[in-house]
Image (tube, grey):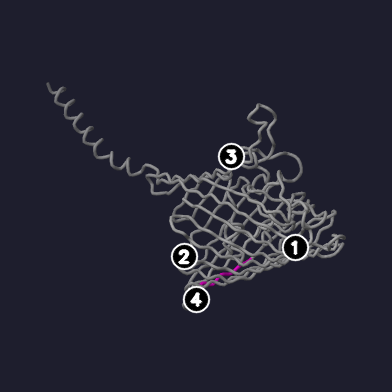
Amino acid sequence: MDFKKALVATSAICAVGALGTAPADAASKPKLDISGYYEVFAGWASGDRTGSTVDGTPVYQGDASQVEGKFNIVHYGEIRFKAEGKTDGGMKWGIYFEDVQDDFDADCAGGGACGTGAEKQSTDEANIWFSGSWGKVEIGGQDGPADRVYHGAERLAHMNPALLDIFADTQSTEGGRGFAREKMNINDTADATKITYYTPRISGFQAGYSWIPELDSKGSVAGSDAGDDSDPAHEFAIEWSGKVGPGSIKASWGGTIMPGNTQDDTGTIEDANFGWRAGVTYSQGPWTVAAGYKDAGEWARFDETGDYTGFDVGVAYRGGRWEVALVHISTEAEDGEGDVDWDHTILSAAYSFGGGLTGSASLHLFDLDDPLDTADGGNDGTAIILGLSAKF
């Protein structure tokens, strides 16, 4: 009888304990968030190279080309999955996946040989992170601090300046692919698999560092043993934000150390390369002004190397449903055959219709001075780009 009473009492205690812990388990269940966007752009460019092939597609790959001087329509989209949770010890964690509009290879569907490279993956970025009072750690495929922590003027324009490369021929003659692409970028590590640490913000300062074991390793695509792209790379940045008078200011400095024999947008850089850029943004009310400077280190053309520098300045007004920005970008790449200069002025405007739908328009004035272009001496022209984006 005593045993039976003990069994009943024990069962009651276990039942009460289970009821008491159920809400805690439910509260600790990770939360899933789905977001994304789709955007379509229509544009036309006219310059000295009208009728020439230009490099650029919705997914920023070179598999297809447009023609300068021809009206083109391009589109792009992403779906982002985020899950966040908290451990029993109070540490926060999360995972992030970014699926993109893939450059579909018909041979894959038919069982033939698929294209190679990370561009054939459907997942663009994927990582896991952990955070606490000690800072934040990210592991996986994600942009590094030098790319994410930047406050230069090109960020003021509603449209990415690199969109121009889809409609106009901005390439330096014999200079490899995309000299003008993302003009204020340095040669960063993009979405290569990495370990990143961000410090907690102290007195407005925060720093970040990424270690990339193999530069050409992305997601499920392992790095190769060919060349030095299998060597480690490093990416880092420091940011300060705070109040200055009636407005707020954000300043950043970041850089990369890339191994030798790596590819940039102009060719192969033989030696280890150090590139950096700095930017500052000041906002007061609806107005924002910004400026940035970069020293991308070396650029390669005809097995020669020279400094690749540039700056940007801009101003933006954001009031109500409208935003307008004026940005100028200027870069210079030194070369033994003559310096290559790039100037790009952008006037952009956007209007929010509400509910995540935004329309935009931009006017681009561009001037590429390339001494190796014996036909035209470069490319000088104008482009008009209209856009429509939907965010959810």
- Which label sits on residue 244? 4
**Secondary structure beneath label 1:** strand
Labels 2, 1: front one: 2
Residue type at mark 1? Tyr
Instruction: Please identify the quarter of the rendering in which residue 213 is found.
Output: top right
Q: Are marks 3 and 4 in contact (CB under 8 Å)?
A: no
Residue type at mark 2? Arg
Tell which of 76 and 178 is nearer to you.
76
**Secondary structure beneath label 4:** strand
- Please check the rendered image and state whether residue 370 is part of the magenta-colored stretch, yes or no: no
Report crowding for label 2: few under 14, some 14 to 19, many 20 or more residues within 10 A (C-alpha).
few
- Please check the rendered image and state whether residue 280 is part of the magenta-colored stretch, yes or no: yes
Residue 302 appears at what percent x and percent y?
A: 85, 54
Q: Are marks 4 and 1 in contact (CB under 8 Å)?
A: no
Please name the residue that numbered disc 1 is placed on: 308
Residue 35 appears at what percent x and percent y?
A: 47, 48
Q: Which is nearer the N-term, disc 4 or disc 2?
A: 4
Q: CA distance from mark 3 to mark 2?
A: 34 Å
Please name the residue that numbered disc 2 is placed on: 321
Labels 1, 3: front one: 3
Residue type at mark 4? Val
Q: Which is nearer the N-term, disc 4 or disc 1?
A: 4
Q: Residue at x 68, y 33 (%)?
A: 114
Q: Are marks 4 and 2 in contact (CB under 8 Å)?
A: no
Q: Main secondary structure of the magenta part?
A: strand
Residue 315 appears at what percent x and percent y?
A: 58, 72
- Magenta segment, which residues? 278-284
Report crowding for label 3: few under 14, some 14 to 19, many 20 or more residues within 10 A (C-alpha).
some
**Secondary structure beneath label 3:** loop
